[in-house]
Image (spheres, helix red, strand yellow):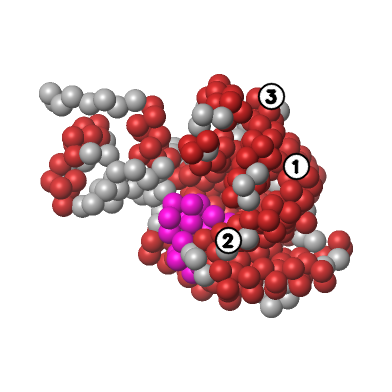
Amino acid sequence: MGIPLATNRTTMWKWEQGQEPDADAQRVLADLLCVPYELVRAEEWPRWLPVWEVTGLTAPWTEAGTVEALADLVGSGRMDRRGFLTITGAALTGLAASWADAPAAFAAALNGDRVTDTMVTTIEQRISTLRTLDDQLGGARLLEQAHGDLALITGLLSTGRYTDTIRIRLYALAARVSHLTGWMAYDAGLRSAGQRYYVGAMRSARTAGDDAFGAFVVAEMGVQVSEAGQTAERVDLISTAIDNAPRTLSPYTESFLYLHKAEALSRDGDHQRAGTALNRAAFHWERHTVEENPDWLDWFGEAQLKSTEGKVLLRAGQPERATSSLETSVTKATPRDKAVRSARLAEARLAGNDLDGALDAANYGAELLEDKVSSARAIGRLKEFSEQLQPHRTVPGVREFRERLHTLPETA
Protein backbone atom coordinates (compact mmCIF):
# COMPACT_ATOMS: atom_id res chain seq x y z
CA MET A 1 0.00 0.00 0.00
CA GLY A 2 3.04 2.27 0.10
CA ILE A 3 2.42 3.25 3.72
CA PRO A 4 5.44 3.15 6.05
CA LEU A 5 4.57 1.80 9.51
CA ALA A 6 6.70 1.27 12.62
CA THR A 7 4.29 -1.26 14.10
CA ASN A 8 5.43 -4.05 16.41
CA ARG A 9 3.96 -6.27 19.13
CA THR A 10 4.18 -3.48 21.69
CA THR A 11 2.29 -1.11 19.40
CA MET A 12 -0.53 -3.59 18.94
CA TRP A 13 -0.63 -4.30 22.67
CA LYS A 14 -1.20 -0.57 23.23
CA TRP A 15 -4.07 -0.63 20.72
CA GLU A 16 -5.60 -3.54 22.59
CA GLN A 17 -5.36 -1.59 25.85
CA GLY A 18 -7.20 1.43 24.42
CA GLN A 19 -4.66 3.60 22.56
CA GLU A 20 -6.02 4.76 19.19
CA PRO A 21 -3.89 3.89 16.12
CA ASP A 22 -2.93 6.79 13.87
CA ALA A 23 -4.74 7.34 10.56
CA ASP A 24 -2.21 5.38 8.46
CA ALA A 25 -2.34 2.38 10.77
CA GLN A 26 -6.14 2.40 10.71
CA ARG A 27 -6.10 2.44 6.92
CA VAL A 28 -3.85 -0.63 6.83
CA LEU A 29 -5.96 -2.38 9.43
CA ALA A 30 -9.11 -1.69 7.44
CA ASP A 31 -7.52 -3.24 4.35
CA LEU A 32 -6.40 -6.28 6.35
CA LEU A 33 -9.86 -6.76 7.87
CA CYS A 34 -11.69 -6.08 4.57
CA VAL A 35 -13.50 -3.01 5.92
CA PRO A 36 -14.31 -0.25 3.38
CA TYR A 37 -12.16 2.79 4.07
CA GLU A 38 -15.26 4.99 3.74
CA LEU A 39 -16.61 3.34 6.88
CA VAL A 40 -13.35 4.01 8.71
CA ARG A 41 -13.59 7.70 7.89
CA ALA A 42 -17.25 7.83 8.89
CA GLU A 43 -16.92 6.02 12.23
CA GLU A 44 -14.67 6.71 15.19
CA TRP A 45 -12.16 4.10 16.36
CA PRO A 46 -12.89 1.40 17.40
CA ARG A 47 -16.51 1.49 16.20
CA TRP A 48 -15.62 0.58 12.62
CA LEU A 49 -13.92 -2.68 13.63
CA PRO A 50 -15.88 -5.73 12.45
CA VAL A 51 -18.03 -7.18 15.21
CA TRP A 52 -18.92 -10.62 13.92
CA GLU A 53 -22.45 -11.92 14.39
CA VAL A 54 -22.76 -12.80 18.06
CA THR A 55 -25.53 -15.37 18.20
CA GLY A 56 -25.81 -14.95 21.95
CA LEU A 57 -27.08 -11.41 21.39
CA THR A 58 -29.58 -12.17 18.65
CA ALA A 59 -30.95 -15.67 19.28
CA PRO A 60 -34.44 -15.85 20.85
CA TRP A 61 -34.69 -16.43 24.59
CA THR A 62 -35.94 -19.98 24.13
CA GLU A 63 -34.37 -23.37 24.74
CA ALA A 64 -33.67 -23.69 21.02
CA GLY A 65 -32.08 -20.24 21.08
CA THR A 66 -29.82 -21.26 23.95
CA VAL A 67 -28.65 -24.38 22.11
CA GLU A 68 -28.02 -22.27 18.99
CA ALA A 69 -25.96 -19.78 20.97
CA LEU A 70 -23.93 -22.55 22.63
CA ALA A 71 -23.28 -24.29 19.32
CA ASP A 72 -22.05 -21.03 17.80
CA LEU A 73 -19.89 -20.43 20.86
CA VAL A 74 -18.31 -23.88 20.65
CA GLY A 75 -17.53 -23.27 16.98
CA SER A 76 -15.97 -19.83 17.31
CA GLY A 77 -15.75 -18.80 20.95
CA ARG A 78 -11.96 -18.84 21.06
CA MET A 79 -11.71 -16.15 18.36
CA ASP A 80 -10.72 -12.99 20.15
CA ARG A 81 -10.19 -10.34 17.44
CA ARG A 82 -6.95 -9.20 19.05
CA GLY A 83 -8.51 -8.77 22.46
CA PHE A 84 -10.90 -5.91 21.66
CA LEU A 85 -13.90 -5.58 23.93
CA THR A 86 -16.58 -5.93 21.26
CA ILE A 87 -19.82 -6.25 23.22
CA THR A 88 -20.21 -2.90 24.93
CA GLY A 89 -22.59 -0.04 25.53
CA ALA A 90 -26.27 -0.41 24.79
CA ALA A 91 -25.83 -3.93 23.39
CA LEU A 92 -24.41 -5.17 26.68
CA THR A 93 -26.84 -3.42 29.02
CA GLY A 94 -29.68 -4.42 26.72
CA LEU A 95 -28.59 -8.04 26.98
CA ALA A 96 -28.73 -7.81 30.77
CA ALA A 97 -32.25 -6.42 30.56
CA SER A 98 -33.24 -9.28 28.23
CA TRP A 99 -31.86 -11.76 30.75
CA ALA A 100 -34.00 -10.22 33.46
CA ASP A 101 -37.20 -10.36 31.36
CA ALA A 102 -36.72 -13.63 29.49
CA PRO A 103 -39.14 -16.47 30.23
CA ALA A 104 -37.75 -19.87 31.16
CA ALA A 105 -38.35 -21.93 28.02
CA PHE A 106 -38.56 -25.70 27.69
CA ALA A 107 -38.87 -27.95 24.66
CA ALA A 108 -39.03 -31.67 23.98
CA ALA A 109 -35.72 -33.49 24.00
CA LEU A 110 -34.24 -34.27 20.63
CA ASN A 111 -33.91 -37.87 19.50
CA GLY A 112 -30.54 -39.42 20.23
CA ASP A 113 -28.64 -41.39 22.81
CA ARG A 114 -29.82 -41.44 26.38
CA VAL A 115 -27.89 -39.18 28.75
CA THR A 116 -27.52 -40.92 32.09
CA ASP A 117 -27.23 -39.58 35.60
CA THR A 118 -23.74 -41.09 35.84
CA MET A 119 -22.57 -39.23 32.73
CA VAL A 120 -23.74 -35.89 34.09
CA THR A 121 -22.22 -36.56 37.51
CA THR A 122 -18.88 -37.38 35.86
CA ILE A 123 -18.90 -34.06 33.97
CA GLU A 124 -19.87 -32.18 37.14
CA GLN A 125 -16.90 -33.69 38.97
CA ARG A 126 -14.58 -32.80 36.10
CA ILE A 127 -15.72 -29.17 36.14
CA SER A 128 -15.17 -28.99 39.88
CA THR A 129 -11.61 -30.22 39.34
CA LEU A 130 -11.04 -27.65 36.59
CA ARG A 131 -12.13 -24.85 38.91
CA THR A 132 -9.62 -25.99 41.50
CA LEU A 133 -6.82 -26.21 38.94
CA ASP A 134 -7.68 -22.74 37.65
CA ASP A 135 -7.11 -21.30 41.13
CA GLN A 136 -3.72 -22.98 41.29
CA LEU A 137 -2.38 -22.59 37.75
CA GLY A 138 -4.31 -19.77 36.08
CA GLY A 139 -6.67 -19.88 33.13
CA ALA A 140 -4.32 -19.86 30.15
CA ARG A 141 -3.17 -23.46 30.65
CA LEU A 142 -6.70 -24.85 31.03
CA LEU A 143 -8.72 -22.90 28.47
CA GLU A 144 -8.72 -25.63 25.83
CA GLN A 145 -9.89 -28.26 28.31
CA ALA A 146 -12.78 -26.10 29.49
CA HIS A 147 -13.79 -25.32 25.90
CA GLY A 148 -13.77 -29.05 25.14
CA ASP A 149 -16.08 -29.75 28.08
CA LEU A 150 -18.48 -27.09 26.82
CA ALA A 151 -18.46 -28.72 23.39
CA LEU A 152 -19.32 -32.08 24.98
CA ILE A 153 -22.23 -30.65 26.97
CA THR A 154 -23.54 -28.76 23.94
CA GLY A 155 -23.44 -31.96 21.91
CA LEU A 156 -25.44 -33.80 24.57
CA LEU A 157 -28.03 -31.04 24.61
CA SER A 158 -28.27 -30.99 20.82
CA THR A 159 -28.55 -34.72 20.11
CA GLY A 160 -29.07 -36.53 23.39
CA ARG A 161 -32.20 -38.08 24.85
CA TYR A 162 -32.78 -37.27 28.50
CA THR A 163 -35.31 -36.73 31.26
CA ASP A 164 -36.42 -33.28 32.39
CA THR A 165 -34.22 -33.60 35.47
CA ILE A 166 -31.16 -34.42 33.37
CA ARG A 167 -31.98 -31.61 30.95
CA ILE A 168 -31.97 -29.02 33.72
CA ARG A 169 -28.67 -30.38 35.05
CA LEU A 170 -27.14 -30.18 31.56
CA TYR A 171 -28.17 -26.55 31.10
CA ALA A 172 -26.91 -25.73 34.58
CA LEU A 173 -23.62 -27.42 33.65
CA ALA A 174 -23.46 -25.47 30.39
CA ALA A 175 -23.88 -22.26 32.39
CA ARG A 176 -21.11 -23.21 34.83
CA VAL A 177 -18.68 -24.28 32.10
CA SER A 178 -19.42 -21.25 29.90
CA HIS A 179 -18.68 -18.97 32.83
CA LEU A 180 -15.54 -20.87 33.81
CA THR A 181 -14.25 -20.82 30.23
CA GLY A 182 -15.03 -17.11 29.99
CA TRP A 183 -13.16 -16.48 33.21
CA MET A 184 -10.16 -18.45 31.94
CA ALA A 185 -10.21 -16.50 28.66
CA TYR A 186 -10.31 -13.22 30.59
CA ASP A 187 -7.44 -14.36 32.81
CA ALA A 188 -5.47 -15.22 29.66
CA GLY A 189 -6.04 -11.71 28.27
CA LEU A 190 -8.73 -12.72 25.73
CA ARG A 191 -11.34 -10.16 26.69
CA SER A 192 -13.63 -10.46 23.70
CA ALA A 193 -13.73 -14.25 23.79
CA GLY A 194 -14.37 -14.11 27.52
CA GLN A 195 -17.43 -11.93 27.01
CA ARG A 196 -18.91 -14.35 24.50
CA TYR A 197 -18.59 -17.23 26.94
CA TYR A 198 -20.31 -15.11 29.60
CA VAL A 199 -23.23 -14.53 27.23
CA GLY A 200 -23.52 -18.30 26.82
CA ALA A 201 -23.46 -18.71 30.60
CA MET A 202 -26.20 -16.15 31.09
CA ARG A 203 -28.47 -17.80 28.52
CA SER A 204 -27.87 -21.30 29.86
CA ALA A 205 -28.60 -20.22 33.43
CA ARG A 206 -31.89 -18.66 32.31
CA THR A 207 -32.92 -21.82 30.48
CA ALA A 208 -32.06 -23.88 33.57
CA GLY A 209 -34.18 -21.55 35.70
CA ASP A 210 -31.15 -20.66 37.83
CA ASP A 211 -31.58 -16.91 38.18
CA ALA A 212 -29.20 -16.72 41.14
CA PHE A 213 -26.35 -17.92 38.92
CA GLY A 214 -27.60 -15.63 36.15
CA ALA A 215 -27.26 -12.64 38.48
CA PHE A 216 -23.76 -13.83 39.35
CA VAL A 217 -22.78 -13.92 35.65
CA VAL A 218 -24.23 -10.46 34.97
CA ALA A 219 -22.16 -9.13 37.87
CA GLU A 220 -19.03 -10.84 36.56
CA MET A 221 -19.52 -9.38 33.06
CA GLY A 222 -19.10 -5.93 34.54
CA VAL A 223 -15.46 -6.55 35.46
CA GLN A 224 -14.23 -6.43 31.87
CA VAL A 225 -16.52 -3.51 31.08
CA SER A 226 -15.07 -1.29 33.80
CA GLU A 227 -11.51 -2.26 32.92
CA ALA A 228 -12.27 -1.04 29.39
CA GLY A 229 -13.18 2.35 30.89
CA GLN A 230 -16.97 1.94 30.90
CA THR A 231 -17.43 2.36 34.62
CA ALA A 232 -20.99 3.71 34.53
CA GLU A 233 -22.10 0.69 32.49
CA ARG A 234 -20.69 -1.64 35.12
CA VAL A 235 -22.80 0.14 37.73
CA ASP A 236 -25.84 -0.44 35.50
CA LEU A 237 -24.99 -4.13 35.11
CA ILE A 238 -24.61 -4.85 38.82
CA SER A 239 -27.78 -2.89 39.56
CA THR A 240 -29.64 -5.06 37.04
CA ALA A 241 -28.19 -8.18 38.65
CA ILE A 242 -29.23 -7.19 42.18
CA ASP A 243 -32.67 -5.85 41.21
CA ASN A 244 -33.59 -9.02 39.29
CA ALA A 245 -31.98 -11.66 41.48
CA PRO A 246 -34.29 -14.06 43.35
CA ARG A 247 -35.56 -12.73 46.66
CA THR A 248 -34.39 -15.94 48.33
CA LEU A 249 -30.66 -15.39 47.81
CA SER A 250 -28.42 -16.66 50.58
CA PRO A 251 -26.45 -14.08 52.61
CA TYR A 252 -23.34 -15.57 50.94
CA THR A 253 -24.57 -14.63 47.47
CA GLU A 254 -25.87 -11.25 48.66
CA SER A 255 -22.41 -10.48 50.01
CA PHE A 256 -20.83 -11.34 46.65
CA LEU A 257 -23.23 -9.11 44.68
CA TYR A 258 -22.84 -6.10 46.96
CA LEU A 259 -19.07 -6.52 46.86
CA HIS A 260 -19.31 -6.20 43.07
CA LYS A 261 -21.46 -3.10 43.53
CA ALA A 262 -18.86 -1.54 45.83
CA GLU A 263 -16.13 -2.18 43.25
CA ALA A 264 -18.29 -0.79 40.42
CA LEU A 265 -19.17 2.42 42.28
CA SER A 266 -15.56 2.87 43.40
CA ARG A 267 -14.27 2.63 39.83
CA ASP A 268 -16.93 5.15 38.79
CA GLY A 269 -15.66 7.59 41.42
CA ASP A 270 -18.65 7.38 43.78
CA HIS A 271 -16.64 6.58 46.90
CA GLN A 272 -19.40 7.31 49.42
CA ARG A 273 -21.90 4.89 47.87
CA ALA A 274 -19.08 2.40 47.33
CA GLY A 275 -18.43 2.45 51.08
CA THR A 276 -22.11 1.86 51.78
CA ALA A 277 -22.18 -1.13 49.42
CA LEU A 278 -18.98 -2.48 50.97
CA ASN A 279 -20.51 -2.30 54.46
CA ARG A 280 -23.59 -4.13 53.20
CA ALA A 281 -21.40 -6.86 51.67
CA ALA A 282 -19.62 -7.27 55.02
CA PHE A 283 -22.98 -7.41 56.84
CA HIS A 284 -24.25 -10.24 54.65
CA TRP A 285 -20.91 -12.05 54.92
CA GLU A 286 -21.12 -12.08 58.71
CA ARG A 287 -24.59 -13.70 58.49
CA HIS A 288 -23.63 -16.51 56.10
CA THR A 289 -23.25 -20.17 56.99
CA VAL A 290 -21.19 -22.76 55.14
CA GLU A 291 -24.28 -24.86 54.43
CA GLU A 292 -25.80 -22.03 52.37
CA ASN A 293 -22.84 -21.67 50.01
CA PRO A 294 -23.76 -22.43 46.38
CA ASP A 295 -21.21 -24.64 44.66
CA TRP A 296 -20.38 -21.95 42.11
CA LEU A 297 -19.28 -19.60 44.90
CA ASP A 298 -17.16 -22.06 46.85
CA TRP A 299 -14.08 -19.98 45.96
CA PHE A 300 -15.53 -16.80 47.49
CA GLY A 301 -14.35 -15.84 50.94
CA GLU A 302 -12.50 -13.38 53.14
CA ALA A 303 -9.68 -13.05 50.61
CA GLN A 304 -12.08 -11.64 48.02
CA LEU A 305 -13.75 -9.35 50.57
CA LYS A 306 -10.42 -7.92 51.69
CA SER A 307 -9.22 -7.52 48.11
CA THR A 308 -12.19 -5.36 47.13
CA GLU A 309 -12.07 -3.51 50.44
CA GLY A 310 -8.43 -2.67 49.76
CA LYS A 311 -9.12 -1.43 46.23
CA VAL A 312 -12.04 0.73 47.40
CA LEU A 313 -9.96 2.24 50.20
CA LEU A 314 -7.01 2.88 47.89
CA ARG A 315 -9.16 4.74 45.36
CA ALA A 316 -10.67 6.74 48.24
CA GLY A 317 -7.19 7.96 49.22
CA GLN A 318 -6.63 5.76 52.29
CA PRO A 319 -3.44 3.80 51.42
CA GLU A 320 -2.62 2.66 54.97
CA ARG A 321 -6.01 1.01 55.55
CA ALA A 322 -5.90 -0.32 51.99
CA THR A 323 -2.50 -1.90 52.62
CA SER A 324 -3.77 -3.76 55.68
CA SER A 325 -6.75 -5.19 53.77
CA LEU A 326 -4.68 -6.14 50.74
CA GLU A 327 -2.03 -7.87 52.87
CA THR A 328 -4.77 -10.08 54.34
CA SER A 329 -6.17 -10.72 50.87
CA VAL A 330 -2.83 -11.84 49.44
CA THR A 331 -2.06 -14.04 52.44
CA LYS A 332 -5.39 -15.91 52.21
CA ALA A 333 -5.56 -16.12 48.39
CA THR A 334 -4.96 -19.04 46.04
CA PRO A 335 -1.66 -18.96 44.06
CA ARG A 336 -3.09 -17.35 40.92
CA ASP A 337 -4.89 -14.66 42.95
CA LYS A 338 -1.74 -14.04 44.99
CA ALA A 339 0.04 -13.25 41.71
CA VAL A 340 -2.73 -10.90 40.56
CA ARG A 341 -3.22 -9.10 43.87
CA SER A 342 0.46 -8.62 44.69
CA ALA A 343 0.54 -5.74 42.20
CA ARG A 344 -2.34 -3.97 43.96
CA LEU A 345 -0.62 -4.45 47.30
CA ALA A 346 2.55 -3.01 45.80
CA GLU A 347 0.57 -0.02 44.56
CA ALA A 348 -0.92 0.60 48.02
CA ARG A 349 2.47 0.40 49.71
CA LEU A 350 3.94 2.77 47.15
CA ALA A 351 1.09 5.22 47.78
CA GLY A 352 2.02 4.99 51.46
CA ASN A 353 5.66 5.91 50.64
CA ASP A 354 6.94 2.38 51.34
CA LEU A 355 9.03 1.74 48.22
CA ASP A 356 10.86 -1.27 49.66
CA GLY A 357 7.60 -2.90 50.73
CA ALA A 358 6.10 -2.19 47.32
CA LEU A 359 9.02 -3.89 45.58
CA ASP A 360 8.76 -6.87 47.93
CA ALA A 361 5.10 -7.37 46.95
CA ALA A 362 5.77 -6.92 43.24
CA ASN A 363 8.71 -9.33 43.26
CA TYR A 364 6.57 -11.89 45.06
CA GLY A 365 4.05 -11.71 42.22
CA ALA A 366 6.82 -11.99 39.64
CA GLU A 367 8.24 -15.05 41.40
CA LEU A 368 4.88 -16.84 41.19
CA LEU A 369 4.63 -16.04 37.49
CA GLU A 370 8.10 -17.38 36.76
CA ASP A 371 7.35 -21.00 37.54
CA LYS A 372 3.95 -21.58 39.20
CA VAL A 373 1.13 -19.52 37.71
CA SER A 374 0.01 -18.59 34.19
CA SER A 375 -2.00 -15.36 34.11
CA ALA A 376 -1.90 -12.54 31.57
CA ARG A 377 -3.91 -10.45 34.04
CA ALA A 378 -1.20 -10.73 36.68
CA ILE A 379 1.49 -9.68 34.21
CA GLY A 380 -0.64 -6.76 33.08
CA ARG A 381 -1.13 -5.57 36.66
CA LEU A 382 2.60 -5.75 37.36
CA LYS A 383 3.29 -3.75 34.20
CA GLU A 384 0.85 -1.08 35.37
CA PHE A 385 2.64 -0.93 38.71
CA SER A 386 6.01 -0.72 36.95
CA GLU A 387 4.88 2.48 35.23
CA GLN A 388 4.17 4.03 38.64
CA LEU A 389 7.82 3.44 39.55
CA GLN A 390 9.05 5.93 36.96
CA PRO A 391 9.92 8.62 39.54
CA HIS A 392 12.15 6.01 41.27
CA ARG A 393 13.70 4.59 38.09
CA THR A 394 17.29 5.22 39.27
CA VAL A 395 16.86 3.13 42.44
CA PRO A 396 18.73 -0.19 42.02
CA GLY A 397 15.83 -2.25 43.34
CA VAL A 398 13.48 -0.68 40.82
CA ARG A 399 15.83 -1.42 37.95
CA GLU A 400 16.16 -5.03 39.10
CA PHE A 401 12.38 -5.49 39.32
CA ARG A 402 11.85 -4.00 35.87
CA GLU A 403 14.47 -6.28 34.39
CA ARG A 404 12.82 -9.26 36.05
CA LEU A 405 9.42 -8.22 34.73
CA HIS A 406 10.84 -7.93 31.24
CA THR A 407 11.97 -11.57 31.31
CA LEU A 408 8.54 -12.96 32.23
CA PRO A 409 6.95 -14.95 29.40
CA GLU A 410 4.14 -13.10 27.63
CA THR A 411 1.92 -16.17 28.01
CA ALA A 412 2.47 -16.50 31.76
Q: Is there a contact, CB below 8 Å, between mark 1 and mark 2?
A: no
4 is higher (above) or lower (below) than 102 = above
Find residue 334 and name its label: 1
Nearer the observer, 111 or 342: 342
Marks 3 and 2, Cα distance to the nearest angstrom? 34 Å
Depth order, front residue of 169/249: 249
Residue that numbered label 2 is attached to: 317
The kind of secondary structure the magenta stretch mainly shows is: helix
- Quarter of the image containing the N terminus? top left
Mark-to-mark CA distance, 1 and 3: 15 Å
What's the mark number on residue 34?
none
- Give the magenta-colored segment's residue range: 216-236
Rendered residue at 60%/57% (across/down): 314
Residue at 41% from the left image edge and 42% from the top image edge: 17
Magenta stretch contains residue 3: no
Instruction: Say above or below: 412 vs 378.
Output: above
Earlier in the chain: of badge 1 and badge 3, it is 1
For the residues carrying marks 1 and 2, which lies nearer the camera in this image? Answer: 2
Crowding at dot 3, Cα within 10 Å, few <14 / some 14-19 / many 20+, comes out as: few
Residue 214 left/right relative to 268: right
Query: Considering depth in this image, is 361 or 100 the residue closer to the camera?
Result: 361
Q: Nearer the viewer, mark 3 or mark 2?
A: 2
Q: Nearer the viewer, residue 58 or 90?
A: 90
x 86%, y 61%: residue: 290
Which amino acid, mark 2? Gly
Q: Can residue 188 be seen in this view?
A: no
